Image (cartoon, rainbow, N blue to C red):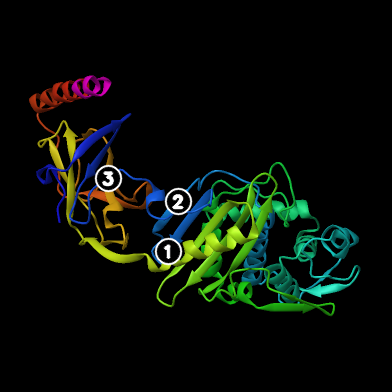
Amino acid sequence: MRLSRAWGGMQLYRIGAVVTAFFIASFGAISAGSAADLIETKAKRIHLLDADTGFVLLSREADTPFPPGSLAKLMTAEVMFHALGKGQVTPETEYFVSEHAWRTGGAPSRAATMFAKVKSTVSVADLLQGLTVQMANDAAIVMAEGMRGSEESFAQLMNERAKEIGLKDSHFANPTGFPDDTQKVTARDMTALATHLWRTYPEQYALFSQPAFEWNKIFQRNKNPLLNLNIGADGLMTGLAEGHGLSIVASASNGSRRVFATLGGFETDQERVEETRKLLQWGLDGFAMKDLFASKEVVGEATVYGGTASMLPLRVEEKVSVLAPVANPEALHARIVYERPLPAPIREGDRVGELQIWVNDTLSRKVELHAAETVESGTLRQRAFGAVAELLVGWLRQFSWAG
């Protein structure tokens, strides 16, 4: 399948120095709808993706920062899982329960706690169960103090690890997620963190679906409300931040596919549970894999300046497959994006742009585009003609857009 002007469905739009080629292909026409056309939801923040492919199924306000609340404990878990993997701690390592940890995160706090006794010691294995099953604040503080001496020092490590694993817009101030003006996360980052935990630490990830945990003779069930809904959910955590509503980072699998989601802005617990269940099931059941392009297939062309040819065919290097919405195949569309004009010389195989695949207004995947052939530098006459043509085309487009 080749996409070019011959299809009669291509339109060029210029945004600054970037040309975006919208095209209509056999997998569906360009939709003028929005994400809400695919599925209605009360979530104000959404980032839902397929775990194996990284294909984004639905995204809304995914890069808008918000206070994480207890979602920060996912980063605390990552730091501890990483330390276990590096041999810096062991499951048998014992940490002391300080007065601060007990009063701030333990029984006196009247918040989520594993009820660790003050001035006792608790193993890392048990603290991690308290953190992942009960979202225990005392477990988070005890591990932070035990590993780095203070919550502040541990938060520095959280931010170092966040940067290392690719979280771009999040900052952590403490291991619990207690209110702090500098603490922020995004739905995109939290979904990336959850996916990282699942992929990198499969043994520890299983803790998030542990049904219950008993400590200090107090039995507590897992605080994740999705685990008993029979939808394949096996993680991760819920959060609450004043003024930003209830949130959740969740994952579910149907045996053949897995999805991760970060959702937020809910007003009630019931709303959070119902909307999360709906979106997870839609993510698992509402999409089917579709092959778009074969390896090395030419998908379109780009304009060239100062070369022996004025147009350059663009190809993908690898096979391109996508998850297409079953009920709304027309929502799937794509764009060729490149800096125009491309200056000659250009060698075959050079990366010159990208193919953006969209599901309505959700950017779902980016694929590199490469030159399908070589374009040498043109003669002086060809370069001069190209310069005049580029100026004329740019002027005409500017004039037509202004109208």
Quarter of the image for the N terminus: give it. bottom left
Asked which quadrant contains residue 127, the reply is: bottom right
For residue 377, which numbered disc appears in the image? none
**Closer to the N terminus: mark 1 or mark 3?**
1
Asked where in the image residue 175 lies, by quadrant, the reply is bottom right
Q: Are marks 2 and 1 in contact (CB under 8 Å)?
A: no
Residue 23 in picture, x, y percent from top left = 21, 45
Say which mark, if any, is on residue 59.
Answer: 2
Label 3: which residue? 335
> Residue at point 69% right, 42% down?
182
Mark-to-mark CA distance, 2 and 1? 12 Å
Q: Nearer the viewer, residue 187 or 264?
A: 264
Q: Start and end of the magenta stretch? A: 396-403
Q: In this view of the protein, can residue 375 be seen by the observer?
A: no
Horizontal side, residue 227 vs residue 363: left or right: right
Q: Earlier in the sequence, mark 2 or mark 3?
A: 2
Residue depicted at x 40% and y 57%: 57
**Label 1, residues with CA under 10 Å away: few <14, some 14-19, many ≥20:** many
Q: In the image, residue 294 lies at what x, y percent?
A: 20, 62
The residue lying at 67 percent from left, 44 percent from top is 243
Q: Which residue is mark 1?
A: 283
When the figure is inspected, residue 167 is found, relative to residue 96, above or below; the finding is: above
- Quarter of the image holding residue 21? top left
SS at mark 3 in the image: strand
Instruction: Provide residue 169's location: percent of width, then percent of height.
Output: 56, 46
Looking at the rendered structure, the kind of residue marked 2 is Ser
Residue 79 colored in magenta in the image? no
Kindly report which numbered mark, 2 or 3, lies closer to the viewer in this rendering: 2
